[in-house]
Image (tube, rainbow, N blue to C red):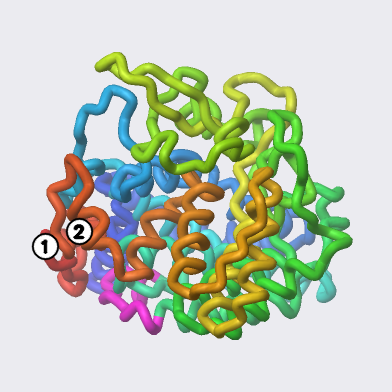
Amino acid sequence: MKNTSIKYTYIFSFFLLLGLTSCEEMLNVDLPSNELSSVTIYASDPTAEAAVNGIYQSMVTSTFYSSLHYVLGETSDELILKTQLENVYTTNEIPENDGTTGSMWTELYKTVYNANSVIEGINASKTLTPTKTPRWIAEAKFLRAYCYFYLTNIWGDVPLVLTTNVDQSALAPRTTQAEVYNQIVLDLTAATADLPVNYSNYNSQRIRATKWAAEALLARVNLYLGKWSDAATHATAVINQTANYKMITGLTSANSPFIADNTEAILQIPYFTTAYTYEGAALFTTAGTYMLRKGNTLFETDDARKTNWTISVVASNGSTFLAPRKYKNAYVSTPVERSTVLRLAELYLIRAEARLKSNDITGAQQDINVIRNRALLPSTTLTDPTQLAALISLERERELFGEFGHRWFDLKRSGTIDQVLGATTGKIWSSTDSLFPIPETAIRSNPFLTQNSGY
């Protein structure tokens, strides 16, 4: 009885690590039945395939279609509510018991758990087709790495959970960001060896990870780590796949990098029961829920991204502002859009920055001009490294606004976050605000889980 009690305590603690507060359902779990269910799931190819697909479905949550866009947009200098009312995100005063950021933690760890379950289940199975199992494991590792990228960049040192064994994970302490990044690189490197090189396994739909999705994320990770040569190499590996990817031209609502299966998309996530994206309904709305803080000043004259990816809205004080409108569809099905997780433009931006850091001025110019020319802007002739770096940073703002917290992370990794946000209207800024608070429920359940400074 004592061992059983300890087991249930660990299970309860693990799910509180995920940020859950209810224990009644967990106390009724029949462990032997669950173990048998796992064996059954990984007994045949169709059910194993369904389990892998389930990892992607676990990403169809408010974190992925909403929070990573608007919460990180608000905590940076990118977005503010159309009403101009301040909240805990725009002021950077997020409390430990904030429900939205707590859900972000929970949902990211749920996806990690699902990935771990697939890896363990497939490795333990003796009945699956051997030629298929490496791809499934590679997909799970890619998705685990993707989630840990956000976990460590939002919260810093976080528990590194690589198992479904609650005895090992329920009371896991925080792991250093360096170790988390090391695991991300290990997972992505392993995934590149076994992921497919095209989308033929997926009926030509760009809704599952390929080798190039792993290479794209490796490019981003190495950029964040300051490994310029590696970042450029991984970005080049994707850019060179011209049979799969090319930049779209002539931006319109029917020709954009957010349309399903467009040539710029590297990985998209469908909302399995709809033909539209929740982004179009919740964030990039026709009425303009959020405004770009910098408004018209963000763009040069005739920038096609301003024309096609923003709308003019009237704020509560009567002033006209620009609102993001990248995703066009809300509750309609034409054209079909998908939440675009990775796209080619980012790889050109990554390589431009990496080349500049490696003193390849000409290469950096070439890459940033791909982005500028697609936006109908003239090529840059800047050769001064400081000026060119500023332009690359600005083009990242223009190209990636409203998407997956890029601006928030760029401010952090560039070391400019204190300077920029300290001078942003409405911010109550402290340098410790660059990390979000570990959710209160997780802290209470795990004595080895410490809080970030400043909370």
Question: From what the image shows, is residue 400 above or below residue 302?
Answer: below
Question: From what the image shows, is residue 242 above or below residue 327?
Answer: below
Question: From what the image shows, is residue 44 above or below residue 363?
Answer: above
Q: Is residue 425 left or right of residue 16?
A: left
Q: Position of residue 408 (x, y in %)?
A: 37, 55
Question: Which residue does the image show at 49% across and 75% down from the upper left?
Answer: 385
| Marker count (numbered) | 2
Question: Which residue does the image show at 54% across and 43% down from the upper left?
Answer: 60
- As measured in the structure, the alpha-carbon distance from the residue carrying label 1 to the one carrying label 2 is 7 Å
Residue 50 in sight: yes
Q: Position of residue 439 (x, y in %)?
A: 23, 55
Q: Position of residue 308 (x, y in %)?
A: 62, 32
| Image disc number at residue 454 | 1
Q: Position of residue 61 (x, y in %)?
A: 48, 42
Task: State the extent of the magenta-drawn residues as a range.
Answer: 166-179
Question: Which residue does the image show at 17% across and 70% down from the upper left?
Answer: 450
Question: Which residue does the image show at 80% across and 70% down from the upper left?
Answer: 240
The three-letter amino acid code for the residue at tag 1 is Gly
Q: Is residue 170 magenta?
A: yes
The three-letter amino acid code for the residue at tag 2 is Asp
